[in-house]
Amino acid sequence: MMVQREKLRSETSKQPSKMTKKFPNVNVFRKEILKEPMAKPSAIVTEDENGPQTSADTLQQRIGYTFRDPAILHIALTHSSGATTRFASNERYEFLGDAILGEVVCIELFARFPEADEGELTRLKSDVVSRETCARIALGIGLDKALIVGKAIAMLSILPMSIPANAMEALIAAIYLDSGRRAVKTFIRRFFWKEIDRAATQSVEANAKSALQQLVQHEFSCSPRYVLLDEQGPAHHRAFQIAVRIGTREYPPAWGASKKQAEQLAAHHALEELHRSNIPSESQP
């Protein structure tokens, strides 16, 4: 009986588990991940070590966060071109970081702008978490110089915008995996809250002309006119002063780096004046 039990136990141990049957490569993936060499966190360089890059220590100083587990940071900084396997790159971290960033920003927008409708909140969120925004912040903290990339990428004088943008999302995921929700929210607040302010300001300015057009047509049955009052500066760095006129009344002018920007700001000034004065009858054309 003992012999039969031992034989049965031996045969059972040789059979693949349910997980292995469903995902036959799972053990292979685990082995590949475990055998990946880890770069020293204080000396992360490009794959071919062609010149020193920003160290992981310097990056952590810039973002105000020190990783408990350097291996997590290593994965976050490893672009697919510099990884020996897909699972050794930061691609999975990008997926997680994108979701975390979106959630934290959505909650903040919902709380900060109680009068904004769904469409406006969506526009703000898209701007704040966009590839352009993530890339700009990544370049500002030197994240692009700390990346582990392949030889072909390392030879480029300018990285494609997607690389630092994706690395920013991976870094967000890494902080979450290393220390949890509170730490990652602190990081996002530090670097993305000012982007919310910027996006909100631009949204107001972008909608000012449209709002003014609708208001003036409804109240006065005409359209506002934009008058160029002045322009200054050299040709390559020109500034324009524009005012809105409704009938014979001229509203406070605004300066802008382009005529379009000056018109938006001037429209915003006109809207403020009209709402403050409750659209007086003497403003009518």
Image: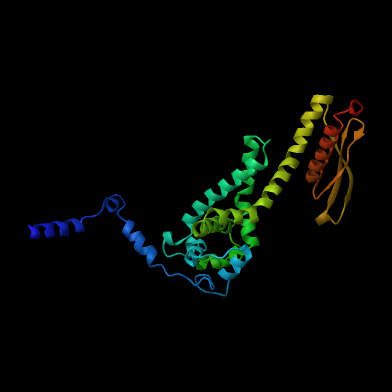
Quadrant of residue 155 within the rendered picture: bottom right
Does residue 236 lie above or below 282 as drawn?
below
Give the colour scheme shown: rainbow
Residue 113 appears in the rendering:
yes
- Along the viewing direction, whichever of 96 and 133 lies nearer the viewer: 96
Instruction: Give the residue displayed 85% in from the left and 29% down from the top.
Output: 279
10 on left or right of 23:
left
Against 173, is 150 above or below? below
Residue 150: x and y in percent read 50, 66
Q: Which quarter of the image is occupied by the C terminus?
A: top right
Q: Give the farthest residue toward the left.
A: 1
Within the image, what quadrant is residue 222 found in?
top right
Compared with residue 226, is residue 66 higher up or lower down, i.e. above or below? below
Q: Nearer the viewer, residue 227 or 33?
A: 33
Residue 54 makes an appearance in the image: no
- Left or right: 89 in relation to 53: left
Residue 71, percent across and down? 47, 66
| Image coords of residue 182 (percent x, y) | 56, 54
Residue located at (34% from left, 63% from top): 31
Q: Quadrant of the N terminus?
A: bottom left
